[in-house]
Amino acid sequence: QVQLVESGGGLVQPGGSLRLSCAASGIKFNINLMDWYRQVPGKQRELVARITAGGSTTYADSVKGRFTISRDNAKTTVYLQMNSLKTEDTAVYYCSMRSAYATDWGQGTQVTVSS
């Protein structure tokens, strides 16, 4: 069974930075997509950033130029570097990894941007 464990969330002031990590274990099939989503209470979960098996990346318009998604060479850990954080970035951030057979999710990590 695939397990995804996120870390790196916390409280940061506006303009600050955080780096989220998501480590996977139990992977049996090639991962096609590694994503970061976020969700605030009362709203739908939104896709923040994606990296494909080939290394292509896409970002939500709201985070372009501020967030960077990356992964390790073993393709078992995905990162989200978040710079120039804004109060509206406050959310629970989830990582997701998709193979041809399943989509797995982490438990989420809280990011709070506040002065």
Image (cartoon, rainbow, N blue to C red):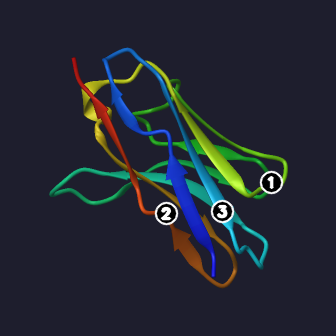
Q: Position of residue 80 (x, y in %)?
A: 56, 39
Q: In this view of the protein, which residue sits in the foreground, 109 or 47?
A: 109
- Which is more foreground, mark 1 or mark 2? 2
Q: Are marks 3 and 1 in contact (CB under 8 Å)?
A: no
Q: CA distance from mark 3 to mark 1?
A: 18 Å
Q: CA distance from mark 3 to mark 2?
A: 9 Å
Question: Disc 1 marks which amino acid?
Answer: Gly
Residue name at image x 64 percent, y 55 percent: 23
Q: In this view of the protein, which residue sits in the foreground, 4 or 82?
A: 4
Element type where label 1 sits in the image: loop
Residue identifier under label 2: 106
Q: Position of residue 96 (x, y in %)?
A: 54, 62
Question: Disc 2 marks which amino acid?
Answer: Gly
Residue name at image x 31 percent, y 24 percent: 86
Element type where label 2 sits in the image: loop
103 lies above or below 79: below
Q: Are marks 3 and 2 in contact (CB under 8 Å)?
A: no
Q: Are marks 1 and 2 in contact (CB under 8 Å)?
A: no
Residue identifier under label 1: 54
**In the rendered structure, which disc, 1 or 2, sits on the residue that comes first in sequence?**
1
